[in-house]
Every structure is written in structure tokens, then in C-alpha cells.
Amino acid sequence: MPSSSNTTRNGWDAWLYALTIFVSAFLLFQVQPMIAKMILPWFGGTSAVWSTCMLFFQMALLLGYVYAHWLHALPPRRQAIVHSILLVLSLAVLPVLPGAKWKPTDASDPSLLILGLLSVTIGLPYLALSTTSPLLQSWYARRAGSVPYRLFALSNFASMLALLSYPVLIEPNFTVRTQSWAWSTGYAVFAISCATAAWIAARSAPAAGKNEPKLTEKQGDAPTVGLRTIWIALAACASTLLLAVTTFLTSDVAAIPFLWVLPLAVYLITFILCFESQRFYNRTVFFPLLIGALVCFAWYLQPRSLRMNMGITIALLAAALFVCCMVCHGELARLKPHPSRLTGYYVMVSIGGAIGGLFVGLVAPNVFNAYHEFPIALVVCAGLAAFLLFRDWNSFGAAPYRKPLGWGLTVLVLGYAGWVASITKYNISGYRAIARNFYGQLRVEDEGNVDTDIDADRKLLHGRINHGIQMLDPKLQRTPVAYFCEASGIGHAMQTRLPNTNWKVGILGLGAGALAPYGRAGDTFRIYEINPLVLDMARTWFTYLKDTPAKVEVSLGDGRLVLEREPSQQFDLLVMDAFSGDSVPVHLITREAFATYFRHVKPGGILAVNISNRYLDLQPVMERAATAFGRKAVILDYTAKDEDMLCNSSSWALLVDKDLLASADSLKTGRVLAPFTKFRMWTDDFSNMLSILQ
């Protein structure tokens, strides 16, 4: 019978294990949006930055689980020594602040650069954190003789808490530098706690747990190759769906932490529920719901789904992702092995997650010309569910019906695959050109017949967002249209130029080159574009750049970073028209960014920012920036009418000095913004997207 001192000791040890796992998981997932937000400004503010970060996190998690599996085979004392050395080494990289030397210097694919940056900046701490859950669970199982899967649920609960707290509590109230130092301090505390737990486990003999299910003396049977393959497939499917949904949201809405963490939080909630208790996952409930979720996802693959408002879109996609991940993770939990095999089990699960990350983060952008990973994951999910139902049918259904069930499930899966394939084919058909790279998918689409329709046009689409239009009628090909027509805000800015003067115009964001028609002989248009594909499309499929009489210069690279390296260009007009999805990348509208812009704008010049979008109200950001630099922010909104052929609805912010505002008639129709005194100006160190969501 154990003594009271041993009972007390075991109780404190259990608390230490639980606390260490909780803190490690919290830090593990708090650093993900934090480090991604830090480096996002360096790589164009695109959603692909988050996908690449997720790939790193999943690969590091896999390495951590492999390390834990290897360490678990060593004698207890050697485990404590090796792991303590890793913890000490990881402290040497604190604080986790990326160095400016990692900023890109050209427009090449930055995927490997991002992976290298993350490896150097947070590689060792992330590795140490990722090993904690499987290691401490194995130590607890050996020491207390208890099933440790609830510790896995605790780990996922802490992860979810970290993710949800970031966009609503951490990001709005703390600068990224403060976040980094706070996180680094928390990590140092974790390292001490984890090392203590390692030495307690090494020096203590196994004991019988009191309140937990007990392990048998015999180790569980080794899992078969088939079972391990199922583990990997389920984890890979859930991971791919997670990243595909995240890419959809951050490409067509905004690359912001809130839309990064929401799908990941949903993903983790399903882990928590499925590994906390078997009662949360019921096949009779979730398999029918899976049909609805798969139909919902397929519907959203269609272009008409764009008509839904943002709230409904996010809610439905999150609900569908929840159901799919509940099935994948519920089946994973149902097929979990004897606890003596848990480190190998976690390795298989992390291999699946890494496969999903590699597929979405590296393979898809370089192999596919469209977002084919999403429909592929949907079909795989349907096929896995059908296979598992057929595989286990004899255990809960009548054996004679197994064969008809197999044929029925096969027909359903093939029918769904055909439907999804037809949607995918439709989505990439009818375009003059279609291509994809790290920065997203580009398509060129003709609408109308140039021989019969005067309003026939050609569009450049980035994802689902229109990034430039040119009329196909030869008489209108050199006319600025859409967001850049003469009635728009940028059209009013162009009208401020004095007669017989030559202008130097800077443009961040090429698009189709739709601002070039404003150029006159003697003008210089200097354009900054981060995506080489955009330049190729503009030169190949649109005639704006070659038709303009102005001199055109194109500089490839992130516009802000290139401007930071250049001497003052003395622009008469600097246009900021760079978009990621349907919003402006945050790093292009911070105090530091505006300081760079105004360094390049001559006295009396204009800084014009396209703030047209459906989801974000950027007016407070514009007013605070204008006030900080002694300017006024003039908003020029244009609402297109049904009969408008050349103009789209748009909203432009012109940041001008008081003298120009008083003298230029074309600006007097605008609305001068009153001070937003309660709005905190954004900096590279602080921004809060939730505060401007419409």
C-alpha cells in the first residue's frame, strides 16, 4: 500500500506534468500567429506566408515527435540529460525576434527563405515545445501506470486557448516586440518546469495511479502497416482541409491573424473533443453531417458562392471544417493504440500533418495552375469515410449487407468526385490564361464579344478578386476604366495636374497596368510589383503598358522594401494600389510605410490609396496617417450606376497638403475625414484588424 508521502508526491508530480504540458502547448500555438505577423510585411502580406509558416510548424512538430519517439527508447536518466541539453540550447536563441537580414532582396519565390528564417529564429524552442506533450505523456504513463490521453486533450485545449486569445486579446493590446519578450519569458519558465519534470521522471520508480484507468502489464500489439497508413491518411486529410480553407479565406478576404487562427482553432477543438472522451464522436451523427459538409464545401468551390456575405461565408466554412475534422480526428481517436505505443502513434499523426502542409505549401503552388488541393482533399475525405465504414461494417451491421454497402459507397464517392471534378473544370475553363505561384492564382478572362458588344472587356483576376480591366473595343482600349476611371478618386487626383507639366508617378501594384492611360509624353510612370507573374500577364494580355506615351519603368519586388532602398524619387503622385485578397496588406499602411512614401513624394504632391474593399473600413488608418504627417485625408467615393460601362464603384483616400486641398477644384467634391482620436495609429509593431472589420 503506498504511503501518504508517496501519494502526495504523485499528486504534485501529476500537477507538474499537466502544468508543463499546458504551458508548452499554449506557447507552441501562441508563437505561430505572432511570428507570422512579424514576418508578413517582408513577404508581400500574402496568404501564402501563413501556409509556408504552417508547413514549418508541421515539419517541426514531426521532428519533435520523432525525437520524442527516439528519446523514449533511452534509459530514463539519459532521457533527462539529453532533453535538458536541448532545453538549455534553445534558450540561447531568445528573444524570438527575426533579424532584418532575412528581408528578401528580389521577387523570387520566398518559400525557402521563410523556412530558413523560422528555423533560425524559433527552430530550437519550437522543437522543444513540440516534444513536450508526447514525452510527458509517456513519462506519466510509465510512472503512474495510467492512460495519458487526457493529457493530449489538455494540450489541445491550451493550444486552442492560445490561438483564440491572440486576435482578440494579444494582438489588439500589445506590440509585437512586447509579445516577443513576454513569450520568451514564458518559454524560459517552461524550460525550467520541463527540465524538472524530466529529472523527476528519471529518478522515480513507476507507481500505481489512483484515479486513472490502469495499463496492463503486457504491451499492446504492434500496429500493422495498414493501420499506420490509415492514421497518416486521416491526419493528412484533416491538415489539407485546414490549410485549403485557410487559403480560401485569407486569399479572398484578408491575410490577417483572425482568419489564420479561426480554422486552426476549429481544427484543434475537434482534437480536444475526440481525445477527451469517446462520447463526443458518434458515427451515426457525424457521418450524415459529413455529407452535408462535403456538399457545402463543393458549393463554395463555385464562383456564385462569392455572393454570400463575409459572416455567413466564414460561419459555414468553419462549420463544414468542424464536421470533416471531427470525422478524421474521431476515427484517429477510435483507432488509437495501446498507450505503450503512443509515441509511434503521434509520429504517424504528425507525418500525416506534415504531408498535408507539404502538399498545400510547396507542391500545389508549384505544380497546379489552380487551387486543386481543396477538391482533392474533399474527395479523399469522402473516400476515407466510405472505406472506414465499409471496413468496420461487420462489427455493427448485418454481414449480408456488406457487399451491397460497398457498391453503394463506391457509387456515392465516385459521383461526388465527378461533381467536384466538373466544378473544378468549370472554374478553370474559358480563360485566356491561367497560372499560379507563391503569390496566388492569376487568370485572364474575356467577357463579351468584341465584334458585337461595345462593352466587351478583358479582366485580370487574382483568386476571385478583379485586379484590372481593359476594354476590347479598339476605340476604348486606351481609356482608364473600372476603379481607375476618370470619375473615380484617382481620376480626380490626375485632374489636379497643371497644364503643360510633366509628372512623375509612382505606382505600388501593377495589376493590368490600368493607370498607364493617364500617362502623357514626357511623363514617367515607375511601377513596383512583387509578383513576376503579374508583369508577364500585363505585358502579354493587356496593351496598357505599350500603348501609353509615358515612359514606363517596372521594378520587381515588394514596393515598400524597394522604396526603402531607393533615393527619393520626388513623385508628383504616388499611388498605393497593392492588394492581398480583397484588402490592403497591413505592412503597406503603417506609420513606417507612410514615412517611406512621403519621403518619395515631392512637396505639394499627392499620395493616393485605393481603399475599395468589402470587408475593412480603412478610413481611420488613412486619417491617422495623414494627421501624423501634416496632411489631410480626402475620401472620394464613387458609386457606379446601372448605365455605367466604364466605371466601377470605388473608394480612394487622397493624402494631400492644405494648400492643394484649397486650390484643386477636383478635390472639393471629396470628404475630408474628421480626426479619429480614439483610433491608435498602426505601426510595424502594432496593428489591429478586428477594429476595422465591417
Image: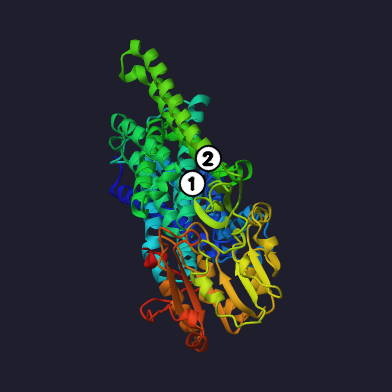
User: Which label was assigned to residue 147?
Assistant: none
Query: 257 or 204: which is nearer to us?
Result: 257
Query: 234 or 253: which is nearer to us?
Result: 253
SS of the residue at dot 2?
A: helix
Image position of 165 with respect to 67: above or below: below
**Which residue corresponds to mark 1?**
243
User: Which label was assigned to residue 373?
Assistant: 2
Q: Residues within 10 Å of mark 2 (few under 14, many from 20)?
A: some
Where is residue 618 shown, x and y percent of the image? 43, 69
Q: Quadrant of residue 342?
A: top left
Where is residue 36 shown, x and y percent of the image? 52, 59
Query: 40 or 173: which is nearer to us?
Result: 40
Total numbered labels: 2
**Relative horizontal placement of residue 471, taking residue 388 as reference (left or right):** right
Image position of 37 with respect to 455: above or below: below
The nearer-to-camera label among 2 and 1 is 2
Question: Is the C terminus in the top left, top right, bottom left or bottom right quadrant?
Answer: bottom left
Mark 2–mark 1 contact, CB under 8 Å?
yes
Residue 71 in view here: no
Query: 141 or 76: which is nearer to us?
Result: 141
Residue type, mark 1 in image = Leu
Residue drawn at (54%, 69%) of the image: 588
Image position of 304 with respect to 620: above or below: above
**Relative horizontal placement of residue 209, taking residue 494 as reference (left or right):** left
Residue type, mark 2 in image = Glu
Tell me which label, 2 or 1, sits earlier in the chain.
Answer: 1
Give the distance between the C-alpha atoms of the residues marked 2 and 1, in whole angstroms: 9 Å
Where is residue 641 shown, x and y percent of the image? 41, 61
